[in-house]
C-alpha cells in the first residue's frame, strides 16, 4: 500500500521580511530532507518543499509530514504542524531546535526526532504504519555516517538553486566550542567520516562540475582530506567548503586543496579579539595570527569568505569599524556578519540565561539580525545598528575595489563581490524566469578562473619559501591546538558552526585582555604593511579617511 510523505523546510525568512534575500536561500537545496527521502522505503510517495523558494502547500492528502526546524523558523514550523494535523496528517518535527527543545516541539507535533535521523527514521515510519507512533525518537550519532544514503536530488526543484550538488563527507566534531550547536545535536566529542567509497560514488553521479561540501570543517582531519583530494584531483570539479583557521598552518596543505579544485573557503574568524575566543572555548582562533592566515590563503589562490560575529563581552561600539578595516586590509573577498545569538542547548545560552541577560524567548528574532540579549560593551540598539552599518559599508563599491585590487584574479574577485552583494533585483529576475541552470554554468566558469599568482604556480622556489615562511601563524607564546573536524548532516546544513539564520556566541567575561586584537598586534601584519608599495598605502590611507567620513555622516 502506497503512503504519501511530505518533507518541508520551514522558512527562516519569507518574501516581504526585512532581511529576506532570495539568492541567499536559493544557493542550494535542503540536503537534509533529500537525505531523509533517501532513507524512505519505496512504497512511500515523497514530495519535498523548500518554503524559501516555493509554497509548501499540496492539494493531495498526506499521511506523514516531516518538518525541518531551525530556531528562527520554529513559529513557522509549529504553524505548519497545526495546519497539517487539522488536515489529518501525522507530523514529525526534527532538526536543531526540536533536538534542543524537544518538550516544546512535542506540544506541536505527533512525534519529535531528536538528533540525527538515520538510525530512527525507518522505525518512525514503521511505527506509523502499525498505528504505534511514539512521541520521541532519539537518533544515535555513532555509526550514523556510514548510513547516509544517496540524496534524492531528483526530488528538488531543478531550476531553483545555484549550486545543485551539495554533499557531506564527515560529521561531528572533536571540538566543544561553547557557542556551537554541535554538542547538543551530536554530543561533545563525536566525529566520523563517511566511507570514502560512498563519497566517490556520489561524486561520480553529479551532472555538472560544481560542488559545495557542507561539512562544518572539511579540511580539519588531514587523513580524510588527503584521501578526498585524491578522488577530486583531475576530476574537473571546482568546489567550496568551510574550514577552520588552522588549515593554514602548512601552506602546502592549502596548495593541495587548490590543486584538488578548492576555490573558496568559508572561514570563521568570529572575532578579532583573542580574549573573546578564549572565553568561548575556541582556542584555535585565540592562538592564530589572522593576517598571516589571510596571506597564506591569498598565496594559494583560495578565496576567503569570512564569518564575523558582533556582541561578545569584549566588543565595544568600535568593533564594527575595526572589523571593516580588517576585511579591507586583508582583502576578505566576501563576508557574513552576524549579531551574536545564543542557541538553546549551548553553554552560551545557559550562561546568558543564568546572568539574566536574555531579553526574551521570541525564537523568530533569534535570527542573527536582532540583539536578543544585553551586551556588556554596548546597548542592544547599538549592536543592531552597528551590525547593519557594517553590512552596508562592506558592500559598497569602494570597499569591493579595495578588497579586490592587488591580488591575482582581480576582475574575478570584483565580479564575485558585485554578483553577491549588489545584484539582488537581477537575481530575483533570473530565479523567477527559471534561468538558474544558466547562472550555474556561468558561476562554474567564473570559479574555474585562476586567482593564484601564476609565478607561484611555476616557481618551485616561491612555493618552498612559502612552506618555510618565518612568519608565525600562531601568536608568539600561544599554544597550538590540535587539528579538529566537525559536521552535522542529520541536522540542517551548516555554515561554519551555525546553520543559516542561526548564529550564537557569548563570552566568559573573566577573560583578560579585551583590548587584544588578532589583527592589530600581528607581527606578520606589521611586516606586510611595511612592504606595501606607496600606491597601496595611499589607497588604504584614503579608505581609513573614508571610514571616518562615513561615521561622521551618520
Image (cartoon, helix red, strand yellow):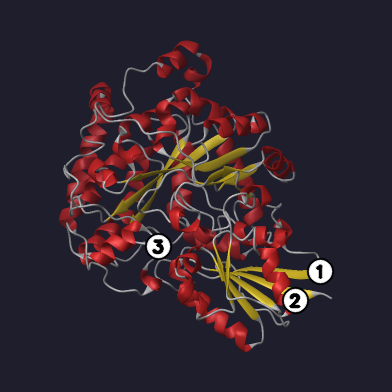
In the image, is 331 to the left or to the right of 455? left
Q: Is residue 30 visible?
A: no
Residue ID at (17%, 48%): 548
Residue 55 locus on image (x, y percent):
61, 74
Mark 3 neighbour density, 10 Å: few (under 14) some (14–19) many (20 or more): many
Residue 4 against residue 434 in the figure, above or below:
below
For label 2, the residue is 129
The furthest residue to the bottom: 86
Residue 287 locus on image (x, y percent):
30, 34
3 or 2: tag closer to the N-terminus: 2
* Quarter of the image with the N terminus in it: bottom right
Residue 330 sits in which quadrant?
top left
Residue ID at (26%, 56%): 311
For label 1, the residue is 43
Instruction: Give the structural element (helix, strand or loop) at label 2.
Output: helix
* Quarter of the image with the C terminus in it: bottom left
Amino acid at each position: 500500500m502506497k503512503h504519501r510523505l511530505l518533507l518541508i523546510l520551514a522558512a527562516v525568512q519569507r518574501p516581504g521580511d526585512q532581511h529576506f534575500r532570495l539568492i541567499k536561500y536559493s544557493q542550494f537545496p535542503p540536503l537534509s530532507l533529500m537525505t531523509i527521502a533517501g532513507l524512505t522505503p519505496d512504497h512511500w510517495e515523497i514530495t519535498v518543499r523548500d518554503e524559501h523558494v516555493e509554497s509548501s502547500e499540496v492539494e493531495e492528502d498526506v499521511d506523514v509530514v516531516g518538518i525541518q526546524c531551525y530556531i528562527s523558523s520554529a513559529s513557522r514550523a509549529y504553524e505548519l504542524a497545526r495546519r497539517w494535523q487539522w488536515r489529518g496528517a501525522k507530523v514529525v518535527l526534527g532538526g536543531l531546535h526540536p533536538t534542543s527543545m524537544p518538550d516544546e516541539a512535542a506540544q506541536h507535533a505527533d512525534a519529535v526526532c531528536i538528533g540525527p535521523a538515520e538510525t530512527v527514521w525507518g522505525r518512525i515510519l514503521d511505527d506509523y504504519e502499525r498505528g504505534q507512533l511514539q512521541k520521541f525518537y532519539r537518533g544515535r550519532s555513532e555509526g550514523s555516517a556510514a548510513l547516509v544514503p544517496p540524496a534524492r536530488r531528483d526530488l528538488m526543484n531543478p531550476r531553483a538553486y545555484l549550486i545543485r550538488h551539495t554533499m557531506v563527507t564527515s560529521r561531528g566534531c572533536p571540538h566543544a566550542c561553547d557557542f556551537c550547536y554541535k554538542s547538543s545535536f551530536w554530543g561533545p566529542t563525536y566525529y566520523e567520516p563517511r566511507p570514502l567509497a560512498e563519497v566517490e560514488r556520489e561524486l561520480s553521479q553529479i551532472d555538472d562540475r560544481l560542488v559545495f561540501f557542507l561539512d562544518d570543517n572539511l579540511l580539519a582531519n588531514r587523513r580524510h582530506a588527503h584521501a578526498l583530494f585524491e578522488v577530486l584531483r583531475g576530476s574537473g570539479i571546482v568546489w567550496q567548503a568551510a574550514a577552520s583557521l588552522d588549515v593554514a598552518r602548512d601552506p602546502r596543505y592549502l596548495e593541495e586543496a587548490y590543486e584538488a579544485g578548492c576555490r573558496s573557503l568559508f572561514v570563521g574568524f568570529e572575532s578579532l579579539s583573542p580574549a573573546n575566543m578564549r572565553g568561548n572555548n575556541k582556542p584555535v582562533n585565540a592562538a592564530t595570527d589572522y593576517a598571516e592566515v589571510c596571506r597564506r590563503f591569498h598565496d594559494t589562490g583560495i578565496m576567503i569568505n569570512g564569518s564575523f560575529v558582533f556582541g561578545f563581552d569584549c566588543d565595544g561600539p568600535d568593533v564594527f569599524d575595526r572589523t571593516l578595516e580588517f576585511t579591507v586590509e586583508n582583502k576578505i573577498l566576501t563576508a557574513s556578519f552576524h549579531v551574536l545569538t545564543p542557541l538553546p542547548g549551548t553553554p552560551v545560552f545557559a550562561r546568558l540565561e543564568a546572568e539574566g541577560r536574555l531579553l526574551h524567548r521570541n525564537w523568530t528574532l533569534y535570527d542573527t539580525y536582532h540583539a536578543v540579549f544585553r551586551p556588556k560593551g554596548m546597548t542592544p540598539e547599538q549592536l543592531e545598528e552597528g551590525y547593519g552599518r557594517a553590512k552596508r559599508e562592506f558592500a559598497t563599491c569602494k570597499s569591493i575595489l579595495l578588497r579586490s585590487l592587488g591580488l591575482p584574479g582581480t576582475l574575478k574577485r570584483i565580479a564575485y563581490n558585485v554578483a553577491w552583494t549588489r545584484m539582488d533585483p537581477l537575481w530575483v529576475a533570473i530565479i523567477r524566469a527559471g534561468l538558474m541552470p544558466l547562472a550555474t554554468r556561468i558561476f562554474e566558469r567564473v570559479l574555474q578562473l585562476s586567482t593564484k599568482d601564476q609565478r607561484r604556480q611555476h616557481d618551485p622556489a616561491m612555493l618552498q619559501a612559502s612552506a618555510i615562511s618565518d612568519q608565525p601563524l600562531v601568536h608568539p607564546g600561544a599554544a597550538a591546538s590540535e587539528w579538529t573536524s566537525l559536521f552535522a548532516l542529520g541536522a540542517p546544513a551548516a555554515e561554519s558552526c551555525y546553520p543559516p539564520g542561526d548564529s550564537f556566541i557569548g563570552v566568559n567575561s573573566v577573560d583578560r585582555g579585551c583590548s587584544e586584537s588578532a589583527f592589530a598586534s600581528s607581527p606578520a601584519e606589521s611586516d606586510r604593511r611595511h612592504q606595501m608599495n606607496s600606491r597601496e598605502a595611499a589607497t588604504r590611507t584614503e579608505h581609513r579617511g573614508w571610514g571616518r567620513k562615513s561615521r561622521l555622516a551618520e
